[in-house]
Image (cartoon, rainbow, N blue to C red):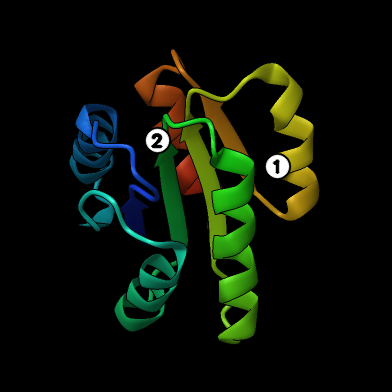
Amino acid sequence: MKVLIAKPGLDGHDRGAKVVAQALRDAGVEVVYSGLKRSPEEIVAEAVQEDVDVIGLSILSGAHVLLARKVLEGLRAQGAGDIKVVVGGIIPPRDVEPLGALGVHRVFPMGTRLPEIVKAFKETTA
């Protein structure tokens, strides 16, 4: 399995994303980290170029619904709608269902334990 961990939007804090990336690597997952402040278009292009199975969006800015929608739309437009998208960060409970309705595979609110995240990523491509 190959995963892209991405930081969309203007959020400049990536500690959580790096912790998740390291936990996935420690569990034997191939991880690509996009870096900070990527546009949805850049994330889609990198996911397609790297031939990833899953994109993990780390979002703390509050724009998670909009950014997830743009990434999912971009994937579909590129013929890569089979790439699964998961979202983690500061996600209010009221937004979990709308994210799922958009096509987000899993949502990891702040405080989700690393073993649960790693297990979910592995189950996503099983």
Rendered image: mark on residue 110: none
Residue 90: percent from left, percent from top:
49, 23
Residue 98 in percent (x, y) is at 78, 39
Q: Residue at x 44, y 57 (%)?
A: 55
Left/right placement of residue 18 relative to residue 76 reads: left
Camera sees residue 82: no
> Which corner quadrant of the image does residue 16 belong to?
top left
Q: Which mark is residue 99?
A: 1
Residue tagged 2: 118
Label 1 close to label 2 by CB (< 8 Å): no
Question: CA separation, marks 1 and 2?
Answer: 20 Å
Query: Going by the picture, which residue comes out furthest to the front?
Result: 10
Instruction: Name above or below for residue 4 compared with residue 25.
Output: below
Tag 2: amino acid: Val
Is residue 51 in sight in this rendering? yes
Q: Residues within 10 Å of mark 2 (few under 14, many from 20)?
A: some
Viewer-proximal residue among 85 and 125: 85
Q: Residues within 10 Å of mark 1 (few under 14, many from 20)?
A: many
